[in-house]
Amino acid sequence: MRIEYRIKVKEHMDGSIAYIPQVSHIRIHIGKLSCRPWIEWENLILHSSDYVYNSFHEEQSWFAEEAARLIIDRYKKQLEDEDKKRVKNIRFINL
């Protein structure tokens, strides 16, 4: 599965700019005549100092692009750490 990242940039009428880090998820649409993939984008939310989660309905913006990039980097590291904890092999010792 290929994960993509982007930063959504919102420019407000008062001139302020908000940066929202996002992550993509590939979904499969199954219709009557076809089956096709499409990409859905979710916002990355910093819940605590160590945990980032993704959400369709919540949005957390940052005042600097660098801050949004740091959230994406933290999310990537979190995924790597979770991947390292996955079970690689199970074996049994019979007695």
Image (cartoon, grey):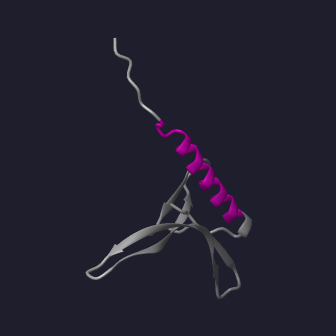
**Looking at the image, residue 37 lies above or below residue 94:** below
Q: Position of residue 70 (x, y in %)?
A: 69, 59
Choose top left, top right, bottom left or bottom right for residue 60.
bottom right
Residue, x 46% and y 68% (percent of image)? 26
* Residue extending farthest top: 95
Q: Where is residue 20 in the image (x, y as percent from the top left)?
A: 61, 70
Q: Which of 63 and 40 is in front in this view?
A: 40
Q: Give the range drawn in magenta.
A: 67-88
Q: Across the whole image, how many numbered discs are drawn on residues?
A: 0
Residue, x 38% and y 70% (percent of image)? 28
* Residue extending farthest left: 32
Q: Is residue 24 magenta?
A: no
Q: Nearer the viewer, residue 56 or 15?
A: 56
Residue 33 as seen in the image, left or right of residue 10: left
**Looking at the image, residue 23 lies above or below residue 14:** above
Choose top left, top right, bottom left or bottom right for residue 75.
bottom right
Q: Position of residue 43 (x, y in %)?
A: 53, 67
Choose top left, top right, bottom left or bottom right for residue 71.
bottom right
Q: Main secondary structure of the magenta part?
A: helix
Screen quadrant of the C terminus: top left
Residue, x 64% and y 84% (percent of image)? 12
